[in-house]
Image: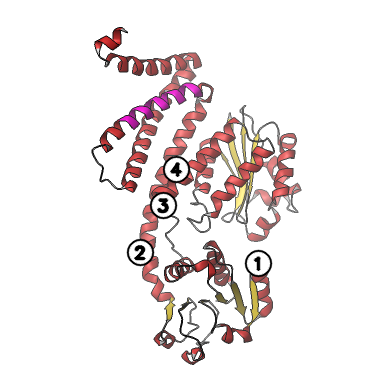
Amino acid sequence: MKIAVVGINHKTAPLPMREKLFFSTMQVTHALQQLPTRLGDAEYVLLSTCNRTELYLATRGDTIPKLNEVAEFFGESSSLNPDELKTSLYFYQDEEAVRHLLTVASSLDSMVIGEPQIIAQVKESYRLAVAAQTAGKIINRLFHCAFATSKEVYTLTSIAQRRVSVAGVAIELAGQIFEDIPSARVAVIGAGQMGELLIKHLQDVGCSDITVYNRTFRRAQVLAEQFKISAAKWENLQSALQQVDIVVAAALTEEHLFEKTIFHSRRKRALLIIDIAVPRNFDPAVNELDEVYLYSVDDLAQVIQENLQARQEDIDQACRIITDNVESFMDWFALSDIGPLIGKLRQKFQQISHTELERFLAGEASLPALQKQKMEAAVERIINKLLHRLIQNFHTVARNYGLQQASDLIDSIISYEDRSADSQLPLDDQMD
């Protein structure tokens, strides 16, 4: 049996190439219907987002499609030359492919680490594969492992909350000042790369009333069309500043664009101005006004530094979680033919650990819920590591002496645990 992934992402391919190789929902379904005929009998999932297009596949035999064949299929589905496309494709097999999917699902391979959209996109790609009947036993197990891994990473780390970019920290600050940030009226000044990133972060937290302003109106329109927001002419900006709740400024300029006096007619209500332009768009004196909160890029620097340190700790922990789950999946994959017995053994180990953990926690009533959750996850990881060692030995036995010998060995361990439990019963119960 083999598992593989072939694809491109934001690290290996420029945006024009990713745009051409993007599959809509309808195109994904059509491609899945073609794949068994084009690339052979296998299980398939096609994941396509703005930042990546990846084909996951699993076969019962040891033969898998070649990189050239996948490149040709992708080339026919787009206007890309297969030879040109091959230079940007990556091709991972077995453990590397499993690790890649788990890393993608946990958002560690995203352009913005910790972004929440990717797991929904992975789930949607799997749903389409199930509907097209191209997901079988191996793909089902693999993708559910990815879903569980993502949930564990998001539960046990703060990776989704740690902003480490200027734009990310800016929007995090907005969320702290405005309780109902989705209803806030927002003006984005600047239609460059930073303006685009700011809009993406704003939409991530639910903002929909966003208007972009740029000296060149056409550039503002293009950006607005891309994100389905509004664009307004530069000459309307000064009056708009009297009405909005949040301003994020990233326009290129050689001097301040806005002085304190422009707010003379603004009603007294909270206004957050995040000026991340260098040089600054707003005169620092604006911060002297009541109910106006002005933050520059330097004001955000300390938060960024603190988040960077915490984010690295989160990434390290997330990588350990991914490694544990990759090992667990590969154990199942190596011995999938005797999977039911492995499942019974895992269930036996989990039953023992659950009983012992409950016994311990019964005397720790004041222990916080999060601490209990972390303890349960730690015990689960211990069980996985112990099982991984055992399964490696089962795999060796299966390879050298056959699956029946491995099955008998697993069965003897399960039976031993049952006999051990019986031997601890009172004598009268043992005689019944």
Marks 3 and 4, the one that precedes in the sequence = 3
Q: Residue at x 74, y 44 (%)?
A: 30
Where disc 1 sits, the SS reads loop
What mark, if any, has residue 322 been given in the picture? 4
Q: Is residue 142 above or below residue 53?
A: above
Q: With 395 as the anchor, is 417 left or right in this view?
A: left
Q: How far apart are the alpha carbons under marks 4 and 1?
A: 36 Å
Q: Which quadrant of the structure image shows residue 3?
A: top right
Quadrant hosting residue 40: top right
Residue 212 magenta-highlighted: no
**Among all residues in the image, which is located at the extreme top?**
431
Label 2 or label 1, whichever comes before in sequence order? 1
Residue type beneath disc 4: Ile
Q: Eyeballing the image, is 248 above or below 257?
A: above
- Relative vertical location of residue 205 with respect to residue 28 in this rendering, above or below: below
- In three-dimensional space, the C-alpha distance between marks 3 and 4, rounded to whole angstroms, equals 10 Å
Whether residue 55 appears in this view of the structure is no
State the residue position of label 2.
306
* Secondary structure beneath label 3: helix
Earlier-in-chain disc, 4 versus 2: 2
The residues colored magenta run 339-355
Q: Which residue matches tag 1? A: 228
Q: Which residue is mark 3?
A: 315
Identified by mark 2, the residue type is Glu
Q: Amino acid at mark 1?
A: Lys
